[in-house]
Image (cartoon, rainbow, N blue to C red):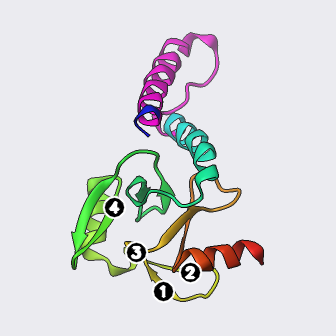
């Protein structure tokens, strides 16, 4: 996992430097957000083989796999994760950011205890399930 983080960091730095140095090519320079999104999506492709995601690599506010450790937020004895201080504040103050709907059953799921997987064909977006069994039944249907 550390190797992936190092590769992600080096890729980000390399792409950032290339996008800055290539401004004279006549092409529109990509924004940092676009570059990071591309890297996260590429990393997500590698993770798809593992199915269940590491909870701490998911931002529970924007519901995306981020590819690196997120900021832990303790609320009522449970740990949630956000990617920035804004997300941390939302997790602390907005209940709806801490819960999702299980796509199989339609029931509310606490994100801190959910079985989290990448949403098919969506890059870095995630789905939250009450259990691995629910996830397995969901992919069968």
Q: Is residue 19 left or right of residue 122?
A: left
Q: Are marks 2 and 1 in contact (CB under 8 Å)?
A: yes
- The residue that label 1 is drawn on is 108
Position of 4 relative to 86 (above/below): above
Q: Main secondary structure of the magenta part?
A: helix
Name, please, the residue furthest toward the right.
Answer: 141
36 in the magenta segment: no
- The residue that label 3 is drawn on is 113
Distance from the alpha carbon under mark 4 to that under mark 1: 18 Å
Q: Are marks 3 and 1 in contact (CB under 8 Å)?
A: no
Say which residue appears at 49% left-offset and 26% top-offset: 11
> Nearer the viewer's eye, disc 2 or disc 3?
3
Q: Are marks 2 and 3 in contact (CB under 8 Å)?
A: no
5 in the magenta segment: yes
Q: Which quadrant is home to the N terminus?
A: top left
Say which residue appears at 48% left-offset and 39% top-offset: 33
- The first of marks 2 and 4 along the sequence is 4
Circle on res. 7: none
Q: Position of residue 92 (x, y in %)?
A: 24, 71
Q: Quadrant of residue 81?
A: bottom left
- The residue that label 4 is drawn on is 81
Closest to the observer: 104 or 23? Answer: 104
Q: Which quadrant is home to the C terminus?
A: bottom right
Distance from the alpha carbon under mark 3 to that under mark 4: 12 Å
Q: Provide the residue span drawn in magenta.
A: 4-33
């Amino acid at each position: 996992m550390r190797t992936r983080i190092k590769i992600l960091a080096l890729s980000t730095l390399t792409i950032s430097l290339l996008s800055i140095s290539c401004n004279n090519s006549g092409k529109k320079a990509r924004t940092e957000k676009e570059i990071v999104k591309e890297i996260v999506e590429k990393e997500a492709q590698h993770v798809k083989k593992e199915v269940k995601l590491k909870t701490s690599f998911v931002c529970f506010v924007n519901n995306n796999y981020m590819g690196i450790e997120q900021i832990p937020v303790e609320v009522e004895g449970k740990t949630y994760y956000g990617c920035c201080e804004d997300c941390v504040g939302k997790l602390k103050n907005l209940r709806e950011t801490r819960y999702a709907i299980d796509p199989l059953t339609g029931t509310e799921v606490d994100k801190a205890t959910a079985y989290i997987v990448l949403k098919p064909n969506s890059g870095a977006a995630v789905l939250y399930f009450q259990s691995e069994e629910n996830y397995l039944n969901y992919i069968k249907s």
